[in-house]
Amino acid sequence: MASGTFDSIVMAHRAVREFVERALQEEDVGALLPQIERVWDILPEHFFYEEQAGGFLDQIRLRAPGGEEHVTRLLAEHRRFESEVPELVDAIRRGDADALERLHEFAHQIREHELLEGLLGGLKE
Ligand SMILES: [Fe+2]
Ligand SMILES: [Fe+2]
């Protein structure tokens, strides 16, 4: 695997971590719109990198204890984030009353997701 792929994964994880830290401290959901839009700009490509044949998730599948089970969970989360985040962005733009709660929930979920990947993939960040 090209090192650029791993570099991209590490960079995306860093951007997500910065988003999570900011999101969980912020109570003004409107102020977080640019941040979640930026995260949404990078996530589909990030998921693609992780999922490509011989890529990051395949490494976990082969090397981590219980790898197949973890990868099944991680893939399901990718698909869920892909459907939920655009809805969340729309909810923030509309000013829905529960938008902040949903954004905090997403921040917790993506943090857990990336932490698990970092742990399983042995990423040094
Ligand atoms: Fe992932
Ligand atoms: Fe990731």
Image (cartoon, grey):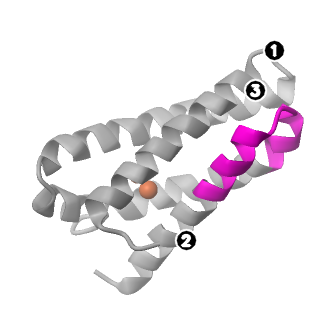
Magenta-drawn stretch, dominant element (helix, strand or loop): helix
Question: Disc 1 marks which amino acid?
Answer: Ala
Res 87 seen here: no
Q: CB atoms at circles 3 and 2 under 8 Å apart?
A: no
Residue 23, image quadrant: top right
The disc placed on residue 23 is: none
Which residue is most to the front?
A: 25
Residue 90 lies left or right of residue 93; in this view the side is left
Q: Nearer the viewer, residue 94 or 69?
A: 69
Residue 80, percent from left and from top: 45, 32
Density class for disc 1 (Cα within 10 Å; few <14, some 14-19, many ≥20) is few
Residue 97, percent from left and from top: 81, 14
Q: Residue at x 81, y 42 (%)?
A: 33
Q: CB atoms at circles 1 and 2 under 8 Å apart?
A: no
The disc placed on residue 100 is: 3
Q: Secondary structure at mark 3?
A: helix
| Spatial CA span between label 1 and label 2 | 32 Å
Residue 103 lies left or right of residue 110; in this view the side is right
Q: Residue at x 81, y 18 (%)?
A: 96
Question: In this picture, which residue range is highlighted in magenta?
Answer: 17-34
Q: Is residue 40 depicted above or below 97 in this figure?
A: below
| Spatial CA span between label 3 and label 2 | 26 Å
Q: Nearer the viewer, residue 49 or 61?
A: 61
Q: Is residue 56 magenta?
A: no
Sooner in the amino-acid sequence: mark 3 or mark 2: 2
Check disc 1 and report the residue beneath it: 97
Q: Residue at x 55, y 36 (%)?
A: 108
Residue 72, percent from left and from top: 23, 40
Density class for disc 3 (Cα within 10 Å; few <14, some 14-19, many ≥20) is many
Question: Disc 2 marks which amino acid?
Answer: Met
Check disc 2 and report the residue beneath it: 11
Res 26 seen here: yes
